[in-house]
Image (cartoon, grey):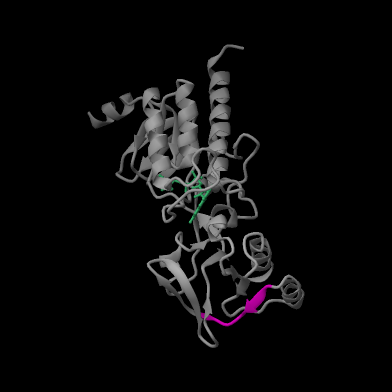
Amino acid sequence: MVTVLHLCRAMFDVAIVGGGPAGLSAALMLGRCRRHVLVLDLGHPRNHRSCALHGYLTRDGIAPASLIELGRAELSPYGVETRAIGVTGAQLIGDHYHLSLANGGEERARYVLIATGVVDDLPAIEGFEECYGRSIFHCPYCDGWEHRDHPLAAFGRGAQVTGLALGLKTWSEDVIVCTHGRRLERGLRERLDRNGIRLRTERIARIEHVEGALTEIAFVHGNPIPRGALFFTTGQHPQSSLAISLGCTLNRRGTVKTGMSCDTNVPRLFVAGDASHDAQFVVVAAAEGVKAACAINRALQVEELKP
Ligand SMILES: Cc1cc2nc3c(=O)[nH]c(=O)nc-3n(C[C@H](O)[C@H](O)[C@H](O)COP(=O)(O)OP(=O)(O)OC[C@H]3O[C@@H](n4cnc5c(N)ncnc54)[C@H](O)[C@@H]3O)c2cc1C
């Protein structure tokens, strides 16, 4: 009986894994294309620690959770189904995917869009995580304006932290590089020096803060430095291994290599948002969701229409 019910279950045109800006934006467009769409989402977007989302035209300063709420509400007229659940596996069988869900259930869809985002790698330094999203950030474009003219720190190593520190000069004259025990090569040190950026290579003991608002960086040796915010470049990893397990090719950054339409090297599989490209902004993720949606709809049309 269970098997009969299972077999009778309708096949979705598209299953979207991840209900952040990329996934919801794709769902909106596919819903408007009258597609049978299922969104499966764990509900843990990359910016969940952030208080305000910036640089999204008409929504500058909105709470990230409010944007998601608005996005979900806009899906309802189009019959898009959303479920708060993780996808644990996927398999392409013939011309459709079988998706395994965290509750042991299964769904089928002709196309899959993965929009599962990334997670930032935070160093294990006392106080770092508490300040993350409040006064510690990875992106000056997202949070630099709010800390303009504040004393800033750039955290990381080598050429990456040097580039970050130089970029931060757009927002503040007072920038110090912290390498947490790593040496910086001479050419980079000289470039920092020429641009009036100080360097601290000692290991950091802890980040002092008041309820997530950074006040001071304390070192294992040497004087602490008062700072208003810290920007870091320490890497990231995919939030889900689904795309990798399906055989997607990765780019140098470790995210999925995609084509112009968010297509991948795997049949019937698209990837959008932070999980693919390296311009990682909400507005870009939303735009990629739309591009993927149109490409999937075109692929479905090719299958449905007579030549
Ligand atoms: C502190 C901070 C501040 C930021 N500020 C800004 C800003 O001001 N402006 C801006 O443009 N960008 C900002 N960003 C970047 C922004 O968060 C990302 O670019 C954006 O969230 C990417 O959207 P996405 O849909 O690709 O992924 P996400 O928003 O990360 O959404 C992915 C979704 O997929 C779900 N998921 C993952 N795996 C599974 C699975 N196996 N099954 C089901 N669901 C799954 C996740 O739980 C999540 O809900 C900030 C990021 C951080 C960390």
Q: In terms of image quadrants, where is residue 2?
A: top left
Question: Residue 300 lies in magenta, yes or no?
Answer: no
* Res. 43 visible in picture: yes
Question: Residue 198 lies in magenta, yes or no?
Answer: yes
Q: In terms of image quadrants, where is residue 35?
A: top left
* Res. 268 visible in picture: no
Left or right, residue 209 beside residue 232 = left
Q: Observer-nearest residue: 112 or 195? A: 195
Q: Position of residue 65 (x, y in %)?
A: 39, 46
Q: Position of residue 251 (x, y in %)?
A: 64, 51
Quarter occupied by the C terminus:
top right
Magenta residues, start to end: 197-204
Q: Observer-nearest residue: 188 or 300? A: 188
| Residue ID at (45%, 63%) | 132
Q: Position of residue 271 (x, y in %)?
A: 54, 40
Left or right, residue 233 beside residue 113 = right
Q: Position of residue 44 (x, y in %)?
A: 40, 50
Quarter occupied by the N terminus:
top left
Q: How many numbered markers are drawn?
A: 0
Q: Observer-nearest residue: 3 or 112? A: 112
248 relative to 232, above or below: above
